Amino acid sequence: MAAPEPLSRGAILEPQTHRRAASASARPARAGRARRLPRSLAAYPALFWWGVFFVIPLGWMGYYSLGVKPADLAAGAVSLDDLSLANYGAATSEIFLKVFWITMRTGLLGTLACAVVGFPVAYALASYVSERWRAVLLFLLVLPYWTSFLLRTFAWRIILAPEGTLSTTLRALNILDQPLLILDTNAAVQLGIIYNYLPLMILPMYVALERIDPALRSASMDLGAGPLRTFFSVTVPLAAPGILGGLLLTFILATSDYVVPAILGGARGLMVGNLVASQILASQNLPLGSAMAILLIGMLAGVVLAIGLALWATRAALRLLRGRAV
Amino acid sequence: MASDVELEQVTKFFGDFKAVDGVSLYVAAGSFVALLGSSGAGKSTVLRMIGGFELPDDGSIRIGGRDVTALPPYRRDVNTVFQNYALFPHMTVAENVAYGLRRDGVPGAERRARVREALEMVQMLPLAHRRPSQLSGGQQQRVALARALVKRPSVLLLDEPLGALDRKLRQQMQVELKLLQHQLGTTFIFVTHDQEEALAMSDTIAVMRDGRIDQVGEPTELYDRPHTAFVASFIGAQNFFAGQIGQDQRLIADGFVIAAARLAEGAKPGERGLAGVRPEHVQLSAAEPAAPVNKVSGRVMALVMLGDMVEFVLRLPGGAELFSRLPRDAGVLPGQGQEVWAHWPVERVTLFPYEALAARESGLRRRAEQANGSA
């Protein structure tokens, strides 16, 4: 090709800041009178909210978890005279660990199930459904959220009851020969969690998939990649932020859920959220409840961190395997 | 290396809309062909069918003699430069170019050599580690070109390849693409709505309208001997006079007679017709010409400076506008407001059957474009 560079290259080598500096100096008269407020100012209300209603209470909870339940509750909810880690010892007793494990399993399985069911839905919505139907289907997807979480979850009691809709239908179809006995077990909790958090998985995935220019898939196929290859080399990496967002959102909310196990789980379907609630509300043991809550948060953070590390390692390994491009 | 492409009666529907209507086209191996038409003419759909992104509802497509009508894109020896380049945003420039070679299983050392070669060809090697988002439009265009050509396809498809570039860069890339095509000998098929671009780059132009091909030919042929008034108006500027077609290849217009040297297919005596003459063939003089036909008087309403030429906009007695383009050094030129006689030689006039194209509008649009260009 002929040598044409200066034109096109000049444009890119000029740093972005030049332009901004130029435009700022273009109106010096105003700058003298009222100094422009920094743009980061917009973040402060949210930071304030987050700090006051999240970080500080969390700090208090951490502090409380080191105290003991006072002998006389009239003196206050927690006694902080002798700080110790004793509550963490109590929280990691065998029965509690079992509930922790069940919680983790329920959260992970629920997330996995939501992903398996949700991804194809998000993909179809983003790629195959016409614009008009897309709006209708998205509306239907969030429609359940117009009723209260509590009511929706209670409705599942009717469906899952031994003589409920699901049980009688399955028996009528000769799939079961006796009543379905999953209400007030972890299985019912699992179902309720998948049901409640599925839209939270689908929406971020859909948004990410929808933003991918269809021409990129065409380009991939044009360059010799079949549909499967294109999916893994173009669609998944580009939708990764949405996929991870959906997974995180679902996993965190599902694992720390309290309402679903309380309504559908009965005594056998307990999760950590219920343990925390019963310690704080029923036993009035604020320190032990706090310790459990802190452990739950730590556990969640640990799992998220572990998955993140695994992803990072996989990517690094893949890159190494693929070799340099130039 | 290069292959020929043959479309036979290719038809494509989108719902009830016939986007492409029985298009047959032969593209010789190693040629540079433009599909030219306004938006909605079906030219992009034709290109997408050659690339395999759309399946024709009827007809067949052969590339290098092989029927590829139903083959998916990844099974065709064809690569595409997409309209907005469609570079993978999550990969570097080099990764983008290497993508196709990886899919073909080209081993590491050879792959890297070819990626280098392709990036060198478009002078993008120094920016190999940038992301597409860090590149200008022209640079992205080059990467898209390298990515498509690194696979050494026998046919390269380009969908409005220069559409997103500014005028200066576009003209420069036109030359580069043309040189590159000569150098590689690959068959290039490109889609454009810009007649200047088509004239500048291609060996052959297929003018499309409403899903059909109006005319196929070399640029000079289309310019000098258009088959339809549409082609005449689409390629270059054109003055049209509407009137009744008389005997001896004459058109009886509003108060004057136009004699034509050429009768386009379908123009019959007794029917309505359009006489077309290009602005550069319209001469101006102060005195009335001696010839009995092909002259009309009018007032100079505006002068448009085009660089080496000046365009005169005349208002005719009936209210119509006539454009004349004269070299700036063609003696004493008339000034604004002056009454002049416009005249043109018989051999420069073609008679077309009447069609309802906006004859005036096309002249005005060209003029506006030219004026913008020279500004």
Image: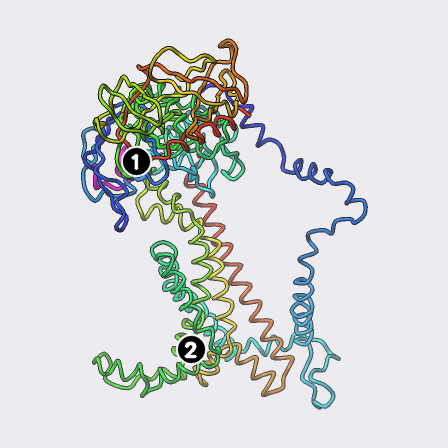
Q: Residue at x 20, y 80 (%)?
A: A174
Q: Is residue B250 magenta?
A: no
Identity of the amino acid at label 2? Val
Residue to which mark 2 is pinned: A189
Q: Quadrant of the N terminus of chain A?
A: top left
The residue drawn where x is 66% and y is 74% is: A61
Range of residues picked out in magenta: B68-78
Image height check: is B97 above or below A124?
Answer: above
Where B325 falls versus B191 (above or below)? above
The image position of residue B233, as x and y in percent, is 36, 28
Tell which subunit mark 1 falls on: B
Determine which residue is flagged by label 1: B209
Q: In this figure, what is the number of numbered marks?
A: 2
Between the C-alphas of marks 2 and 1, the distance is 62 Å
- Residue B45, given in percent of the width and then of the height, sits at 30, 40
Asked which secondary structure carries label 2, the reply is: helix
Query: Hey, which quadrant is residue B64 in on the image?
Result: top left
Q: Amino acid at mark 1?
A: Arg
Find residue A161 and name its label.
none
Badge 1 density bin: few <14, some 14–19, many ≥20, Cα 10 Å: many
**Subunit under mark 2:** A
